[in-house]
Image: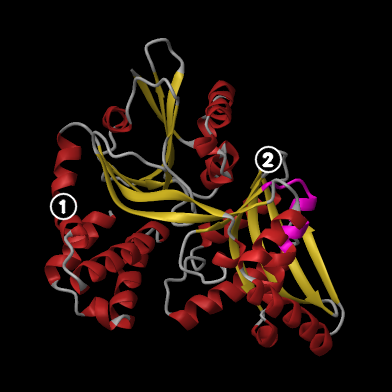
């Protein structure tokens, strides 16, 4: 086994070609977040971006793992918490496993939160499985819409009413779908940051690198990877927007927001339905709506695909030490202790976000202080669970 640890900017053309071949051989890697272009975009805004490249005995590349690597040897998915889909890309006939490759690369542990259909194995511990909602547009938008209307007639009747109401109240409507206008992207970022403030969630767009990442992806317009913006306007005024990533025939929704002035007509939902119609017209056959508890997703999802949350500890002493450090929070979270287990999980997930997005110690400390001050339940968490959560979140 030969393992290299490279910054995305150091990737040679043959590695990029092998990366694309791995994606083409396994449908689990069809997400734009698995594209090498996404890794290159993250590498342009983060110095700690690294790619683990593992070659087998024949010299062929069997495994690629994109990460953000801390000086302690602890790793998160590349682009976290902005990468909805992550995890290693592994050849179907690989003789190398993730834990062994990490150990050779000097990585103690790797936390993931969007690995498609991960399998527990040596060093791989699964904590939670969620479903990512997918709209199947493969047979065309009209076939898709008829199927969804049959399942949810009341919702789509309401949407027809809201669409008519919005035009009566706000005037002529226009829709857009394509490359992102810089002004529209800036407006969407502002809306999203205001939403984080209202909901007391950590503002992941406060960090300069996350905004620069969105801008870098928006500039990409290749056939295999592109930033795509969908918009709805009334009398020329932007009412709602969604920025996503496209890879071949898959579109993954990423950042969405709306102007509260138009809230009475649910412009975000109006845009969601029109976005799918326009995407289908541009050759998209799968639109990933993402994970989470947003109630609207059930009306537009044809099916869901499993994505997993967990941790991989490397083979060797360093990985074993980290496994012990993260064991307490995992035991509490998975132990079926009612409110304590739920609180441990929520605490870990919020700390994961803060420690991933904030690149300086000061930013991490301020983020943790805000989280503990704004969330009474987190503030009541015992010192032991908080310490274990920090260890687990890396």
Using the image, determine if residue 212 lies above or below residue 15.
below
Distance in Å between CA atoms under marks 1 and 2: 40 Å
Question: Does 277 appear in magenta?
Answer: yes
Front residue of this view, candidates 9 and 173: 173
Q: Nearer the viewer, residue 321 or 73?
A: 321
* Secondary structure state at the residue bearing disc 1: helix
* Bounds of the magenta segment: 275-285
Q: Quadrant of residue 393?
A: bottom left
Q: Residue at x 57, y 70 (%)?
A: 296
Circles 1, 2 touching at the beta carbon (< 8 Å): no
Residue 132 in sight here: yes
Furthest toward the front, the residue is 150
Residue indicated by mark 2: 248
Percent position of residue 317, x then y: 14, 35
Residue at the extreme top of the image, as rendered: 58
Circle number at residue 302: none
Mark linked to residue 327 = 1
Q: Judge whether 171 appears above or below 185 on screen.
A: below
Whether residue 192 is in magenta: the answer is no
Neighbourhood count class around disc 1 (C-alpha, 10 Å): few under 14, some 14–19, many 20 upward: some
First in sequence: mark 1 or mark 2?
A: 2
Q: Quadrant of residue 99?
A: top left
Is residue 113 among the parts visible in the rendering?
no
Q: Position of residue 166 (x, y in %)?
A: 77, 83
Pinpoint residue 178: horizontal percent, then vertical percent. 77, 55
Q: Is residue 316 left or right of residue 252?
A: left
Q: Main secondary structure of the magenta part?
A: helix
Quadrant position of the N terminus in the picture: top left
The residue shown at (18%, 45%) is 322
């Amino acid at each position: 086994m030969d393992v290299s640890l490279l910054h995305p900017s150091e990737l040679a053309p043959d590695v990029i070609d092998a990366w694309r071949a791995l994606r083409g051989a396994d449908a689990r890697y069809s997400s734009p977040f698995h594209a090498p272009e996404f890794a290159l975009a993250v590498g342009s805004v983060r110095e700690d971006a690294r790619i683990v490249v593992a070659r087998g005995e024949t010299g062929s590349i069997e495994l690629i793992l994109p990460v953000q690597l801390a000086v302690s040897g602890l790793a998160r998915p590349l682009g976290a918490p902005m990468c909805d889909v992550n995890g290693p890309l592994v050849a179907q006939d690989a003789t190398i496993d993730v834990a062994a490759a990490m150990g050779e690369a000097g990585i103690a542990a790797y936390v993931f939160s969007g690995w498609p259909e991960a399998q527990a194995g040596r060093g791989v511990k699964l904590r939670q499985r969620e479903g990512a909602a997918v709209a199947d547009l493969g047979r065309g938008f009209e076939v898709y819409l008829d199927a969804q209307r049959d399942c949810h007639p009341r919702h789509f009747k309401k949407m027809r009413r809201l669409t008519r109401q919005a035009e009566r109240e706000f005037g002529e409507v226009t829709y857009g779908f394509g490359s992102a206008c810089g002004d529209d992207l800036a407006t969407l970022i502002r809306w999203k940051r205001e939403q984080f403030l209202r909901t007391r969630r950590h503002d992941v767009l406060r960090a300069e690198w996350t905004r620069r990442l969105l801008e870098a992806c928006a500039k990409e317009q290749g056939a295999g990877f592109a930033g795509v913006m969908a918009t709805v306007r009334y009398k020329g005024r932007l009412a709602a927007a969604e920025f996503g990533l496209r890879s071949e025939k898959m579109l993954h929704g990423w950042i969405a927001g709306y102007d509260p002035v138009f809230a009475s007509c649910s412009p975000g939902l109006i845009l969601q339905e029109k976005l799918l119609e326009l995407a289908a017209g541009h050759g998209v056959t799968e639109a990933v709506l993402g994970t989470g508890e947003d109630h609207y997703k059930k009306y537009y999802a044809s099916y869901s695909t499993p994505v997993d949350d967990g941790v991989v500890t490397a083979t060797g002493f360093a990985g074993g030490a980290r496994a012990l450090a993260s064991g307490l929070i995992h035991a509490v979270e998975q132990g079926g202790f009612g409110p304590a287990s739920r609180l441990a999980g929520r605490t870990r997930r919020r700390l994961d976000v803060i420690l991933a997005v904030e690149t300086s110690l000061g930013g991490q400390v301020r983020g943790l202080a805000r989280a503990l001050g704004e969330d009474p339940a987190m503030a009541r968490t015992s010192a032991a669970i908080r310490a274990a959560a920090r260890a687990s979140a890396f």
